[in-house]
Image: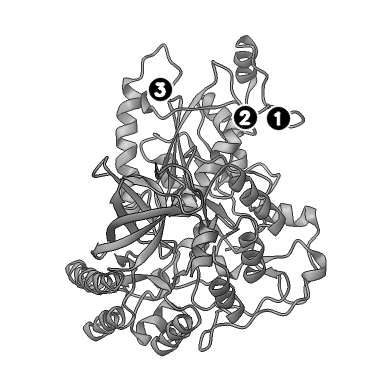
């Protein structure tokens, strides 16, 4: 699972049998539903816009949609306005940018005012029941908004996109008849057609999963213009099939973008002044680009020692270490992060690259999920507690001063009090800087749903989660306290939310740092002092620490390269 975006934080597909001949492009598209009319459990959806749509477009002086000549980017004054809301992980933030890029090219305008919208699209999360309940609650608010809409305006259209659309497609369409459009994570290209169908008063859905859709040819439109950080999706789907996880069923099998398209996007972000890029994927470090024919016979890299998978090793392709090397060379002043990895995919060449490159952050996400070997086996994680700890020690030996984060689930099926205490002890032994901790939420379709019993009472889950959170905070406070007195290089993100007289940013370890907004000397220039701006690097001496935040005094502005050279 991907940990939640800090911007939003508040908290069967078939494989080709071995030896089978590769499918032709047409056969693969047919298997994945690409180019076909989506079929919805027993009835066919309308094929597209009807005559009334084109008559309205002609009356407004706007061309109808044309596969041969797509509209130019931008929108006319009378363009329909779309309001986008994003829930869940960073991948959904990236998906929102892809959705907006597609709609913008098809003549839609963007609005940040819900009352102005002609279309409301919710990019949803399905990883836990609480995430889905938030969407149902939001839909009730939108139902009231629809009812109050003046008759002189066209009816408000509401769409559910992403993982929840994929998991609950039929229920979403039929529950109170509120939702007009349902689109799964691999169907965003079809949104203009689906919205045109909805405009004629019919519901429309496309939740077909694909074996090869990566949106590689679509450059996302950044939703926070002028931002200092950005997400770049490098792969989609997951093959790990952990018993608790819904991701393989909502986002499909693993497939990676061609490296060339990723590098193009990162260069574009660098040209726009972005100073930090996070490479995204459900299993980001299993990246495997098969677009270059002469790399398709390369041997598969080894797994971390003591780790295993439910699938056979996949030979061929350019791997994550190659991508990370190429991305880090684009801009020496741009920080590179990546999430969410699986602990099994950390070959030494990746660790060595992180240690060597000054602009690859010395921060790793190592999702443990549990500290009990027995529970890890039930989760089908592919490692023991001992193998995980051996990896932690190897990572810390390879990358001195590395910052670690992790995911944990409290109250998984069959978890005993002893299992829980082993997770508590793992939190104490590793002492993570950042943690994402949740109570277990059973998801339909998963192996746990079919094979295991959700037998830990809700009150016990709650108590165990509270103990895990308390333990994490205690140990994170100790880990962060060790930074007091040290100088940290901070990428400024903007004003602190709590005080206009303070700035906020993050250090290399992805820990929030707050410091006074003051006149600072620039180590790279000999001009007059100035105030730090978003996107600047500032050296801050840490004066105090909590489990989540560092505070300090700013010393001077500098550059990423100069700061690295001074060490």
Q: How far apart are the two marked residues, 2 and 3, measured between alpha carbons?
A: 19 Å
Q: Position of residue 268 (x, y in %)?
A: 63, 45
Lateral position of residue 129 relative to residue 93, left or right: left
Chosen colour scheme: one colour
- Foreground: 531 or 21? 531
Taking the spot 56% from the left edge, 55% from the top edge, the residue there is 333
- Foreground: 281 or 397? 397
Taking the spot 78% from the left edge, 75% from the top edge, the residue there is 297
The residue pinned by badge 2 equals 106
Q: Which mark, residue 70? A: 1
Q: Position of residue 475 (x, y in %)?
A: 25, 74
Helix, strand or loop status at disc 1:
loop
Q: Position of residue 385 (x, y in %)?
A: 39, 86
Within-10-Å neighbours for mark 2: few <14, some 14–19, many 20+? many
**Quarter occupied by residue 293:** bottom right
Looking at the image, is 534 positioned above or below residue 562? above
Labels 1 & 2 near each other (Cβ < 8 A): yes
Looking at the figure, which quarter contains the N terminus? bottom left
The residue pinned by badge 3 equals 116
Q: How far apart are the two marked residues, 1 and 3, measured between alpha carbons?
A: 26 Å
Taking the spot 43% from the left edge, 15% from the top edge, the residue there is 153
- Foreground: 46 or 207? 207
Lateral position of residue 139 relative to residue 164, left or right: left
């Amino acid at each position: 699972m991907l940990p939640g975006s800090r911007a939003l934080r508040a908290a069967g597909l078939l494989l080709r049998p071995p030896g089978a001949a590769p499918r032709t492009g047409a056969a693969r598209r047919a298997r994945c539903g690409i180019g076909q009319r989506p079929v919805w459990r027993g009835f066919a959806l309308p094929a597209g816009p009807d005559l009334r749509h084109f008559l309205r477009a002609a009356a407004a002086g706007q061309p109808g949609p044309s596969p041969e000549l797509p509209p130019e980017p931008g929108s006319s004054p009378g363009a329909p306005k779309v309001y986008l809301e994003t829930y869940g992980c960073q991948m959904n933030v990236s998906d929102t940018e892809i959705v907006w890029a597609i709609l913008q090219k098809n003549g839609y305008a963007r609005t940040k005012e819900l009352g102005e919208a002609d279309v409301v699209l919710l990019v949803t999360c399905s990883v836990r029941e609480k995430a889905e309940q938030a969407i149902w609650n939001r839909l009730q608010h939108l139902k009231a908004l629809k009812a109050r809409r003046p008759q002189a305006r066209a009816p408000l259209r509401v769409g559910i996109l992403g993982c929840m659309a994929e998991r609950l497609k039929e229920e979403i369409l039929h529950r109170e008849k509120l939702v007009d459009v349902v689109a799964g994570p691999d169907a965003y290209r079809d949104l203009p057609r689906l919205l045109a169908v909805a405009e004629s008063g019919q519901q429309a859905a496309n939740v077909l999963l694909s074996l090869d859709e990566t949106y590689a040819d679509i450059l996302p439109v950044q939703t926070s213009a002028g931002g200092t950080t950005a997400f770049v999706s490098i792969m989609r789907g997951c093959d790990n099939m952990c018993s608790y996880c819904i991701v393989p069923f909502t986002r499909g099998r693993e497939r990676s973008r061609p490296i060339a398209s990723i590098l193009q996007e990162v260069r574009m972000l660098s040209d726009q002044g972005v100073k930090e890029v996070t490479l995204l994927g459900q299993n980001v470090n299993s990246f495997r680009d098969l677009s270059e024919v002469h790399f398709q016979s390369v041997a598969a890299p080894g797994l971390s020692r003591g780790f295993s998978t439910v699938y056979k090793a996949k030979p061929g392709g350019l791997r994550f270490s190659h991508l990370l090397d190429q991305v880090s060379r684009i801009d020496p002043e741009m920080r590179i992060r990546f999430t969410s990895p699986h602990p099994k995919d950390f070959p030494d060449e990746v660790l060595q690259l992180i240690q060597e490159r000054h602009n690859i952050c010395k921060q790793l996400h190592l999702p443990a999920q549990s500290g009990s070997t027995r529970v890890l086996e039930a989760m089908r994680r592919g490692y023991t507690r001992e193998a995980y700890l051996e990896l932690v020690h190897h990572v810390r030996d390879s990358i001195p001063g590395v910052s670690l984060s992790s995911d944990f689930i409290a109250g998984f099926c069959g978890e005993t009090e002893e299992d829980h205490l082993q997770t508590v002890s793992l939190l104490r032994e590793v002492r993570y800087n950042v943690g994402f901790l949740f109570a277990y939420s059973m998801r339909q379709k998963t192996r746990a749903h079919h094979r295991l019993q959700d037998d830990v009472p809700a009150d016990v889950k709650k108590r165990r989660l509270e103990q895990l959170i308390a333990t994490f905070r205690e140990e994170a406070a100790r880990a962060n306290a060790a930074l007091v007195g040290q100088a940290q290089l901070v990428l400024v993100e903007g004003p602190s939310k709590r005080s206009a007289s303070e700035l906020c940013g993050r250090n290399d370890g992805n820990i929030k740092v707050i410091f006074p907004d003051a006149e600072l000397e620039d180590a790279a220039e000999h001009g007059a002092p100035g105030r730090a701006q978003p996107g600047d690097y500032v050296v801050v001496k840490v004066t105090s620490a909590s489990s989540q935040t560092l505070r300090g005094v700013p010393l001077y502005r500098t550059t990423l390269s100069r700061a690295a050279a001074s060490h």
